Amino acid sequence: MLQKPKLNFLYIYLTDACNLKCTHCWQSAPLAGRGKYSMLEFEQCRCFIDDAKEMGLTGVTFSGGEPLLDNDFHKFADYLTQKGIHMNLETNGLLLSKPAILDTIKRNMVYCAISLDGVTPETHNKHRGVKTAYERTVNNLKLMDEINLYYQIITAVSKFNYHELIPLLDWVKKELKHCNTVKINIVSTLGRAEKMNQKGLLFKPHELPQITEDIAPIIDKYPFEISLHIDPVFFSFKNLMRGFSCGGHCGYRSSLSILANGKISICSLGKEVPAYVFGHVSDIDVKNLWETNPLLNTIHGDTHLTLKGVCSQCIFRSRCLGGCRAEALFHTGDFFAANPVCQEYYDSGLFPKSRLIHADN
């Protein structure tokens, strides 16, 4: 039995609304100003943050929707800085030109992960659903350079824009000074991306190894780190040792999420699956939850021995822990089900035998 982990990390979903209409959005985020959506209030979360800090909290990632739509962003950031907690921000970058937002990011040293899905306006804008998205995002990336803030670029890749991936990396090298990481995410079948899947625009499991082979020869060409979010089974052992794989375990054993409606869950999957909502942030006893909740105790145990399907047989199970559990839950209703992508790869007969172990090892 593994030692009970500390609560090291929080994902704070400041809102589930967005100012873009991304074709691949796995949460199908509603457009800000239209329809029904939530905004998280800082005062609801203050005591929870205090208690989590006492339990070992060291880091927070702000996400959404588009988190910078929440007017309380500065309150969260200032308070977390006071507590000595480092912060990451996942953003489409459109609002970074607002002086109050940029000042909050700079004075609190918030590390930004900014989305850019193509090297041309046509590609990025079509992926993001707004005609001016590319121009605004690129201008704000250069604004980050001007004020000497380092940041990450996240690019969501499908068959629609894969042809622009290497040109995009070349453009970042040439045009941007303070990008120190480019993370490549493969678009999954969740949310709005299901429509892309129906059009044949998403990569199938048997196509993923070739992507790893395409990226491997170029990772030393750039002054920034390249991280490819593909599960480790799709890498050759040689490429896996090179350290550019960031696929697999997302950190769910040592984290919780505060959703935009104030509910506490493991991650944003709590929006869709009530069984994984543990209560409201304003009245929950986080220490008691972390130590006594039966579901969390199972997750905090030997998770790799609880996984099912091909994940129970994979040599990477203790490293990967089944990858994204949201995908498994959405597709099967079971948190411990096999990673759907890896299971499909196995069922096709392509899963390498060298990556399998005996069941009771």
Image (cartoon, rainbow, N blue to C red):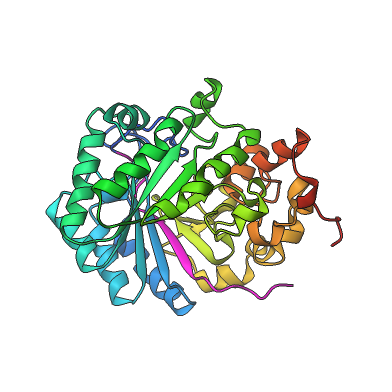
Residue at image position (43%, 50%) is: 183
Residue 88, image quadrant: bottom left
Image spot of residue 214 (x, y percent): 53, 41
33 left or right of 358 in image: left
State whether residue 177 is above or below residue 337.
below
Image spot of residue 340 (x, y percent): 66, 40
9 left or right of 291 in image: left
**Residue 7 highlighted magenta (yes or no):** yes
Residue 169, image quadrant: top left
- The foreground one among 283 and 71 is 71
Residue at image position (85%, 55%) is: 359
State whether residue 95 is above or below residue 265.
above
**Quadrant for the C terminus in the image:** bottom right
- The foreground one among 341 and 1 is 341
Let me know if residue 93 appears in the view: yes
Image spot of residue 53 (x, y percent): 42, 75
**Residue 175 highlighted magenta (yes or no):** no
Specify the farthest residue to the top: 199
Q: Dominant secondary structure of the magenta stretch?
A: loop
Which contiguous range is marked in magenta? 1-18
Residue at image position (50%, 24%) is: 195
